[in-house]
Amino acid sequence: MSLGNYITSLGDNPYFGAGFGLFGIGAGAAVLRKGLQYAVIYFRRQYMITLEVPCRDKSYQWLLQWITYKGARKTQHLSVETSFEQHQTGHIKTKYDFIPSVGSHYFRYNGTWIKVDRTREQHTLDLHMGIPWETVTLTSLGKNKQLFFNILEEARQMALTKTEGKTVMYTAMGADWKQFGHPKKKRPLSSVVLDCDLSERILSDVKDFLGSASWYGERGIPYRRGYLLYGPPGCGKSSFITALAGELNFGICVLNLSERGLTDDRLNHLLSVAPQNTIILLEDIDSAFVSREESKQVAAAYEGLNRVTFSGLLNCLDGVASTEARILFMTTNYLERLDPALIRPGRVDLKEFIGFCSEHQIQQMFAKFYKTGDPETGEIDDYPQKFVKEVICRGKPVSPAQLQGYFMRYKTAHPSCVIEKVDEIWD
C-alpha cells in the first residue's frame, strides 16, 4: 500500500479523525492562550505604569492617608488607626483614621483610573519595624510617570499640614528614624528665659550656619556644626533646644548612646540617614563615656557593656565617613567629665554655659507668670524687683526649674504672697 493510500485510509477512520480533531483544538487553544498571555504582558509593559511602595519607605503612611482622603473615599473596605489628640483646653480627643484595608481598591485621579493593591505578607516580617511586610501598588494606564510623582507630592504636602506649627520628635528604631509620639506644639523661644543675650547668640550662630553652605563648600570645610550646652540640671538646656527647633521649623532626632544594641556602624548609619531639617540631640553625653584618664580606673567587669566605642563616636562626628549638612547638639551636667578630644573644635564648634538663674532671669520669669502694674494708668509696681531682692539675699542658687515649680504652685496667688513665701523655692 502506498503512503498516500495509507494516509487516506487513516482519514477515513472515524476514531483517528476524532482524535486528531481534539488534538488540533487543544493545540490551537494552547497557542491562543499563550498568545493572549504574551499580549497581556506586552500591553502591561508598553501601556501601563506601576508604582510599588513598601512599608519601610517614608512615603508609605503618607500615601495610605492620601488615598483615603483624596482617592478611594467610597471604598467600604477599611482599616482603622486610633490616635489621641490633646487640645489647648486639656481635653483628650480620640481620633480615628480610616485607611484602605488589605485588598484591591479603585479611584479616579485627574481623569485617570488607578488601581490600588495593598498586600500583606503574614509570614514575612519587617525586621526593623517588627510588623508584617506590606506593600501598596498603584497601577494605571499610560506612560506618564509624572502622575505618580504628583500623587506622592500631594501626599507629602498633606502630611506636612498635619505637623504645621508643631515640632516632630524622632527616635532611632532599627536602622532608621521613626516619629516618636505625636508632634508637639512649638514652644516659643521667648518662653525659655536664658541669661542676657545667650539665646539670641546661639540662634544667630545657627542661622548663620544654615545660610553658609556655599561658603563652607568653597573653602573645603565640612558643612556641619556642633554645639555643647553644659551646666547644672534644670537650667533649661533641653528646653532651649526644643524651642530652638520650633523657631527654625526643625524636628529633633533624639539619640541615646547607651541604648542596648547600638554599635559604631549603626550609629554612623543613623547619623547619615537622619531626616532633613532636624537637630540631632545627644543628651547627657557624659553618662555614655568616661574620659580616657578615668577609664584606666574603671573595673574590667564594666567594660564592654556599651557597644558604641569612644573612637567610633569620634569618627561619626568628624571622621572620613561622617555626614555633612548636620546640626548636632550635646548636653551635659558635668563638663569636666568629658574627654577633651570629644569637645575640640571641629566636633564642638560652640560651647555655652547655662547655669543657675541670674537676677535678669529671675525678674523676667516673675514677670511672665504674674501681671504687674496697671495697664490703664500706666503705673509700674516694683514686685519683680522685690522678688529678685528676696531671692538674692538668701544666698542660695536657684534653677529655672525650681522657679517654675514654685510659680506653678502659686499660679493664682497675688505677687505679694509669692514674695512672702519665697523660702519655699528650696523646699
Image (cartoon, helix red, strand yellow):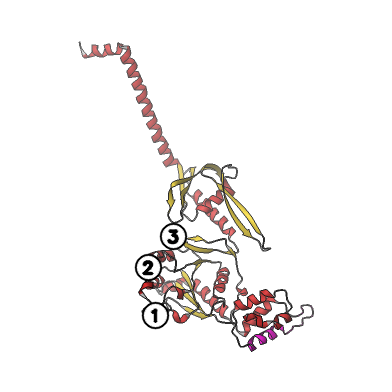
Residue 229 within the magenta-colored segment of the rendering: no
Q: Which mark is residue 276?
A: none
Q: In front: 202, or 236?
A: 236
Identify the residue under disc 3.
174
Dot 2 or dot 3, earlier in sequence: 3
Q: Residue at x 40, y 38 (%)?
A: 42
- The amino acid beneath tag 2 is Ala
Magenta residues, start to end: 373-393
* Mark 1 Cα-neighbour bin, 10 Å: few <14, some 14–19, many ≥20: few
The answer to which of 45 and 171 lies nearer the viewer is 171
User: To which residue does mark 1 refer?
Assistant: 294
Q: Amino acid at mark 3?
A: Gly
Q: Position of residue 164 (x, y in %)?
A: 59, 62
Q: Please say if 66 is above or below 207.
A: above
Q: Secondary structure at mark 2?
A: loop
Q: CA distance from mark 2 to mark 1?
A: 28 Å
Tag 3 secondary structure: loop
